[in-house]
Image (tube, rainbow, N blue to C red):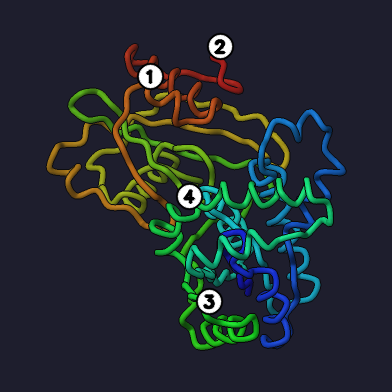
Amino acid sequence: MIVWINGAFGAGKSSTARELVGLLPHSTLYDPEATGAALRRLLPDKRLAEVEDYQDLPIWRRLVVDTAAALYAEVGGVLVVPMTLLRQEYRDEIFGGLAARRIDVRHVLLAPEETILRSRIDGRADYGDPGVDADVRRWCHDRLPPYREAAAGWLGADAHTVDNSALTVAETARAVADAVQGGLAAPCGIVQTPEPTRETLAAGVLLFDDQDRFLLVDPTYKPGWEFPGGVVEAGEPPARAGMREVAEEIGLELAAVPRLLLVDWERPRPPGFGGLRLLFDGGRIAAHDRDRLRLPGAELRAWRFVTEAEAADLLPPVRYDRLRWALRARERGTVLNLEAGVPVG
């Protein structure tokens, strides 16, 4: 398993993690800060200048998953990971990637009182350079508001919280160890199918309301919104796969097999393998059916009906191009053949 210790900067994550390694049998420390430091040496300055925090780099999030999985395969046991994650989509992406490798994550939040947090931040002098240390303290203080927001929302609900305001480092580590070993810090519920090893066939379904808006869902395990649907299983008819996925994802049983709108060949983009993507017209959803839509919390965060213009801000470019042509095919009553989002033939 992985014990992920989250919290604001100054919460005591790193010192607690070092102590925790001595309490949990067969445990190893992995600090993703080392991955961020490596990227500072590997990436061009121009790319680094484009982000304020290396967590905003997709390569960092990918490497954290890959490194943790490789280290886990090498040493086994328990990985103790001290790292602040305040953006839910980044938590979902990283924990989902670990879930795809069948690695359980126990999420623990260290939550001392804010006055104590601020005092700890003010006492930091990690670099021995007054100017640099002042910048680091300012950076940490600036991230307290997003921490408060996350702790009051998704983070507080997701993680097992340990208030270490009055605890020593040793007492905090013992509280975390007891929570993990006693089952209070349970495995996170985020799920993700294993990463493909070759090209895949996927079926998506467009579902419309009485205003001709269509339904999008927000997956926990990848960035960007998506159409209801998923990978077609071996021996499964694609349209039926779309119907199955709609039932599994939002609890809606389609009465009729949906009509094909387009076939799009998605080019491989390492580490992805690409493949064929099909979009079907699932028809209109009656108002009483909309009231019964449900979401599996481990896979989907939200759903909403949107217009084509609104979808441009929600869908990644590849999926948005696919959507635009699917809507044109629906208007014309035809089926389109696309290669990498461009109609051919």
The residue lying furthest to the left in this view is 288
Task: Label 4: state its secondary structure.
Answer: helix
The numbered disc on residue 345 is 2
Question: What residue is at 59 percent from the left and 42 percent from the top?
Answer: 200
Residue bearing mark 3: 164
Task: Label 2: state its secondary structure.
Answer: loop
Mark 2 → mark 3, Cα distance in angstroms = 64 Å
Q: Mark 1 vs mark 2: which is more N-terminal?
A: 1
The numbered disc on residue 309 is 1
Q: Mark 3 vs mark 4: which is more N-terminal?
A: 4
Q: Mark 1 vs mark 3: which is more N-terminal?
A: 3
The numbered disc on residue 218 is none
Q: As shown in the figure, which amino acid type bears the numbered disc 4?
A: Pro
Q: Is residue 35 above or below residue 115?
A: above
Instruction: Classify the position of the N terminus by image quarter.
Output: bottom right
Residue 270 in picture, x, y percent from top left: 73, 39
Question: What residue is at 51 percent from the left and 70 percent from the top?
Answer: 112
Q: As shown in the figure, which amino acid type bears the numbered disc 2?
A: Gly
Instruction: Classify the position of the C terminus by image quarter.
Output: top right
Q: Residues within 10 Å of mark 2 (few under 14, many from 20)?
A: few
Q: Is residue 228 left or right of residue 85?
A: left
The residue lying furthest to the right in this view is 41
Task: Label 1: state its secondary structure.
Answer: helix
Q: Are marks 2 and 4 in contact (CB under 8 Å)?
A: no
Q: Is residue 243 left or right of residue 210?
A: right
- Select label 1 or label 2 by which is in front: 1
Mark 1 → mark 3, Cα distance in angstroms = 47 Å
- Select label 2 or label 3 by which is in front: 3
Mark 2 → mark 4, Cα distance in angstroms = 53 Å
